[in-house]
Amino acid sequence: MHQLSQQKTHYRTCNLCEAMCGLEITYKNKEIISIKGDKNDVLSKGHICPKAVALKDLYDDKDRLKTPLKKTKNGWKSISWEAAFDEVANKLKEIQLTHGNNAVATYQGNPNVHNVGLILYGKPFIKSLHTKNKYTASSVDQLPHHIASLLMFGHQMLIPIPDVDRTDFLLILGANPVVSNGSMLTAPDFANRIKKIKKRGGKVINIDPRFTETSKIASQHYYIKPGKDALFLWGLIHVIFDENLVNETSLFPQLKGLEIVKKIAKDFSPSTIEKSIGISSEEIINIAISFAKAKTAVCYGRLGVSTQEFGGMCQWLVNVLNTITRNIDAKGGALFTQPVIDLVMMSGMNGKTGTFDRYRSRVHNLPEYSGEFPVTTLADEILTEGEHQIKAMVCIAGNPVLSTPNGTKLEKALAQLDFMVSIDIYLNETSKYADIILPSTTGLETAHYDLAFHQLAIRNTAKYSGSLFKKEENQRHDWEVLNALTERMTGKKNLATPKMMLDFMLKYSTYKKEIPSIDALQKHPHGIDFGALKPCLTQRLFTADKKINLAPKVFVDDVPRLKKMLKSSTKNNSFPFYLLGRRQLRTNNSWMHNSEILIKGKNRCTLFINTKDAEKLGLKNQENVTVTSKASSVKIPIEITDNIQQGVVSIPHGFGHHRKGIKMSLAQKNAGVSINDLTLDSNIDSLTGNADFSGTRVQISK
Ligand SMILES: Nc1nc2c(c(=O)[nH]1)N[C@H]1C(S)=C(S)[C@@H](COP(=O)(O)OP(=O)(O)OC[C@H]3O[C@@H](n4cnc5c(=O)[nH]c(N)nc54)[C@H](O)[C@@H]3O)O[C@H]1N2
Ligand SMILES: Nc1nc2c(c(=O)[nH]1)N[C@H]1C(S)=C(S)[C@@H](COP(=O)(O)OP(=O)(O)OC[C@H]3O[C@@H](n4cnc5c(=O)[nH]c(N)nc54)[C@H](O)[C@@H]3O)O[C@H]1N2
Ligand code: SF4
Ligand SMILES: [Mo]
């Protein structure tokens, strides 16, 4: 009893993935006793996944870095924060003075959107560098969403959110939310929300080259050939026009481009595309008709349809499909958010809606998107000599050696830089190339307001989490690290803390009465729920003519390329298999394999291969095979399964911790191989510049 009374409870939002689950953490002094789902959290209602439990391992991890490291001839040496900041700023300035501003590149990895400090202080720091060589994880993930939103709705962050909780028909393409818990769509306990659609008599259809955890609970699953979703979507749109299922008077009032779309769709009848995509024309017709006739319906296309050769076109067509079936800005269809801190409105009012293709990258002539270039070209921008060649790199919470295509090539490039700094909590596959590592606090040591994912959430909620544990005296938060560097680059001091900045933004909130300050919000440890999303697009459209542009020229001009693909053969005798990634409940991109809770048990870095393909090749389960692409080859044990299409194999991304010189003892023991040693930096969606992972071709040998 006495012992129990010393225990305390802390409530917070998990910021590891996009689901924003509420956590209930019991602890005593500096020891975590349990991490559970917070049943009273207004959004997640008790849901949790194994990664949140691993926050304890992350907090206790002996391998995690806490103070700056400098690379010397005799290995890594601890240095003071002040010395580290000075040296980084001096080096960056020196290189820019000699080689120009573009000689310094930045890469911002996934945690940048999960960490309020990185969001608020990252921008001014990067701005202070005045470089065009900016890269982020967006281009291996979600560029197509942003470009589609920018061109159709006028703002890169005006992302339509599928109303999963009220829809009658959910069509899922290239997403596995039962494992990933949703992306560009914050809806914790996604699996339960899918089950509820079926319970209320609705339908869930899943299109995926693999029979996934999501396929298992869907009403129906169809295999599609990798990279062919744009054709499939055109097929659906064709049928909907052909069957006269578009009732123009019922559509969103401000709409333009309908006729253009209708005309293009004529060329993509189900019978012309069925062979290419591997779904029969009857099935395409059935799906299209039932989607269009459902009381409400919504198509959700995510990572698997963004990271392909026609990723941009796919995200355009997902929006088109939802719009022509009068499911845009509609209950049960796709809706737009109006969050408490409304970044879309705040930036939009200042004219900052996003940009596309204002200028092009040096080596491969790839389009700029909102000031950044596609990361697939990063290695070549370092390796190719000439004016504006990258000579130094600032890597902020990113592990591109494991996460971006052709990781081994990027390694070669990073090794030849004059200077590199990593703001990272581990000495890992990427930060080992740095000259200085600046390790910040993370997880339970940080305070959190989810600026990014409140923007993408299925309900309008708000929650602020204070830090559970105070940082150690010698530690620095990410925002402090970035702020110190910005001050040195600009010579200007910024005294505002993240909380002060959030308080400032709340002043402009339509909810300022309900939430006058962060302190006021913090009095609600389970968050505040302002309800389901409501139609609001008329007030939020940022296109110049205040219309939805259903047929942006950029996308329309890309149709001939698609037609060319439709005509060309996909047969590849040297590399007969398509290689796809796969997410797992116990992975978080490339960096949580040093957690005992997540890495224990059987080896999960295996190659899925269809039973018939394995038979043909004479392979036995668990046998090691060599997988070879144009980039490289890896050795990996196989898992024979019926749950993957013939001709397709899959390796989870984020492994490959066998590399020398890293310090992640558990991860190193379960190293696995990196799928991105096989993927090609030359495989891209040439329209948006996004990486095309689904087009990776490999051969498999004993
Ligand atoms: N083949 C293939 N490749 C993929 C994908 C795929 O599906 N298939 N998925 C892609 C996607 S969607 C993404 S988002 C990218 C992700 O790839 P990256 O953007 O490279 O991000 P992560 O792998 O999440 O690595 C995060 C890094 O940040 C560090 N870190 C973690 N927390 C913190 C923190 O609080 N502060 C700081 N300073 N550092 C921190 C970690 O140690 C790690 O080095 O990978 C992409 N790569
Ligand atoms: N447990 C866990 N959760 C995560 C992450 C993690 O690493 N682990 N990462 C987080 C991040 S950064 C993101 S962006 C999200 C991503 O979340 P999701 O968008 O759900 O991405 P995945 O789980 O990779 O699922 C993509 C699906 O697309 C399929 N696919 C591949 N190619 C094609 C194709 O050509 N056509 C079609 N139709 N399907 C295809 C794949 O087989 C796979 O099932 O997950 C987040 N959540
Ligand atoms: S699903 Fe995502 S937000 Fe929820 S507990 Fe797991 S990692 Fe955290
Ligand atoms: Mo991602």
Image (tube, rainbow, N blue to C red):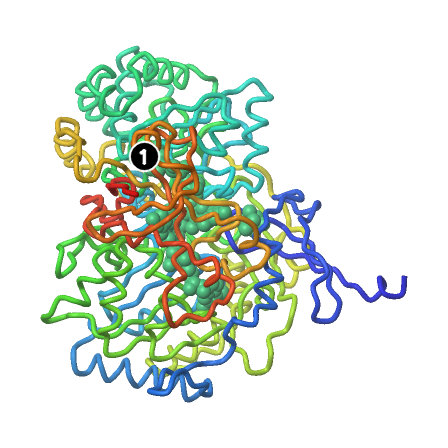
Q: Quadrant of the image for the C terminus?
A: top left
* Res. 436 image quadrant: bottom left
Question: Crowdedness of circle 1 by 10 Å Cα count: few (<14), some, many (20+)?
Answer: many
Image vertical order of residue 49 relative to residue 304, above or below: below
Quarter of the image for residue 283 reads top left
Helix, strand or loop at mark 1: strand
Q: Is residue 152 left or right of residue 456?
A: left
Q: Position of residue 697 (x, y in %)?
A: 24, 41
Residue located 29% across and 54% down the image: 677
Q: Position of residue 578 (x, y in %)?
A: 28, 37
511 sits to left or right of 220: right
Residue closer to the observer: 348 or 188: 188
Residue receiving disc 1: 648
In the drawing, does residue 670 fall left or right of residue 231?
A: right
Q: Residue at x 51, y 32 (%)?
A: 164
Q: Residue at x 29, y 46 (%)?
A: 627
Say which of 636 and 360 sits in front: 636
